[in-house]
């Protein structure tokens, strides 16, 4: 008799608990049920969802709050983007880029932009693995690039930024070396910007609809208009990011204070102009793994050419709002 009484009490407590759960659902961000079995529905003043056969992952139980059970996640889904872009420095003139940094063993496994002082928004410190870096061919990694998603109503407002990997064929991929780039933000329209540690950043002229299915954004063929005037360099019908921003300040300068030519001379020693130095350096404008101030394939000439090639005091300014 006592055992039956306990069973009744326990059953009543479970029912009371379930009713309590139903009545404390809320106004916090909606949740999406992730489970092989279960369902969701609405109740007066809120909603409820549940999964079957799953371990309880977490819950909340506050007045006007939300209660969840099982594998669930916020509705801020992961957007996928297939981006394509070319950097002028390593561009070979035939629809691809060289991978001198990778083939010489200079590419870092972690993004370089945090160390350069860039302040990420909900991203940064992305890393990859050596087997990804070691892959040769058209999918060889050329370098890390910087990506920003900006507010569709305010193109100066960065909502999310992160780093990703750039392949020799221009594809920008996630840190696994082959997947579309993931952004953990809701489906919406965004301005997309892409930059590099010694190239000028560019941004789409208009906001672009992004979704959970991969969106293709090709910045190499002129199909996506870019913000500003003369934001990209044209080479043989391909659109490239301008090379030569060695100081990573948004301006290409050959002379004057904080110019981009002097760091090249500094890195090779500052005395003998014919010296060279190897490594992962911002002064390596053509990204072949060697910083050169004079001679064939030097890095200084690219800067002079990109400001016009005649008047040394000219500058080229990044076309960003």
Image (cartoon, rainbow, N blue to C red):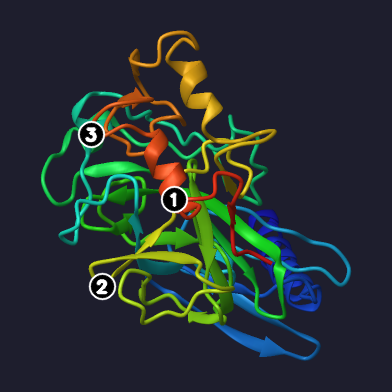
In three-dimensional space, the C-alpha distance between marks 1 and 3, rounded to whole angstroms, equals 26 Å
Residue to which mark 3 is pinned: 100
Q: Is residue 215 left or right of residue 40?
A: left
Seen from the viewer's position, the closer of residues 66 and 21 is 66
Seen from the viewer's position, the closer of residues 98 and 133 is 98
Please tell me whether mark 3 sits on a helix, a strand or a loop.
Answer: helix
- Vertical relation: 85 (above or below) 97: below
| Dot 1 and dot 3 residues touching (CB under 8 Å) | no
Quadrant of the rendered structure where residue 7 is? bottom right
Residue to which mark 2 is pinned: 237
Disc 1 residue crowd, few under 14, some 14–19, many 20+, Cα 10 Å:
few
The spot of residue 158 in percent (x, y) is 67, 61
Q: If you read the primary sequence from the N terminus, does the residue marked by circle 2 or circle 1 appear first?
A: 2
- Vertical relation: 240 (above or below) 254: below
| Dot 2 and dot 3 residues touching (CB under 8 Å) | no
Please tell me whether mark 2 sits on a helix, a strand or a loop.
Answer: loop
Q: If you read the primary sequence from the N terminus, does the residue marked by circle 2 or circle 3 appear first?
A: 3
Closer to the eye: label 2 or 1: 1
Residue to which mark 1 is pinned: 309
Q: If you read the primary sequence from the N terminus, does the residue marked by circle 1 or circle 3 appear first?
A: 3
Instruction: Identify which residue is drawn at 50% across, 67% down.
Output: 231
């Amino acid at each position: 008799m006592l055992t039956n009484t306990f069973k009744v009490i326990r059953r009543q407590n479970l029912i009371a608990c379930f009713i309590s759960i139903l009545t404390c659902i809320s106004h916090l961000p909606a949740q999406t049920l992730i489970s092989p079995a279960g369902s969701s529905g609405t109740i007066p003043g809120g909603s409820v969802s549940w999964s079957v056969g799953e371990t309880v992952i977490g819950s909340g139980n506050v007045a006007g709050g939300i209660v969840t059970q099982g594998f669930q996640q916020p509705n801020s889904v992961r957007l996928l983007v297939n981006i394509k872009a070319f950097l002028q420095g390593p561009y070979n003139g035939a629809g691809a880029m060289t991978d001198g940094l990778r083939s010489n063993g200079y590419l870092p496994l972690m993004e370089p932009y945090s160390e350069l002082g860039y302040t990420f928004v909900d991203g940064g410190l992305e890393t990859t693995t050596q087997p990804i870096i070691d892959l040769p061919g058209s999918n060889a990694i050329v370098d890390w690039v910087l990506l920003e998603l900006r507010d569709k109503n305010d193109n100066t407002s960065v909502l999310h930024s992160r780093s990703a990997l750039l392949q020799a064929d221009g594809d920008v991929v996630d840190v696994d070396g082959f997947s579309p780039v993931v952004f953990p933000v809701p489906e919406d329209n965004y301005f997309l910007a892409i930059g590099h540690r010694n190239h000028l950043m560019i941004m789409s002229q208009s906001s672009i609809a992004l979704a959970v299915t991969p969106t293709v954004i090709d910045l190499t063929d002129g199909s996506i208009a870019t913000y500003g005037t003369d934001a990209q360099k044209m080479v043989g019908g391909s659109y490239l990011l301008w090379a030569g921003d060695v100081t990573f300040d948004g301006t290409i300068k050959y002379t004057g204070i904080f110019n981009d030519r002097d760091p090249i001379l500094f890195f090779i020693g500052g005395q003998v102009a014919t010296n060279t130095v190897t490594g992962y350096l911002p002064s390596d404008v053509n990204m072949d793994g060697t910083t050169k101030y004079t001679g064939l394939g030097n890095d200084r000439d690219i800067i002079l050419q990109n400001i016009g090639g005649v008047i040394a005091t000219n500058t080229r300014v990044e076309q960003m709002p």
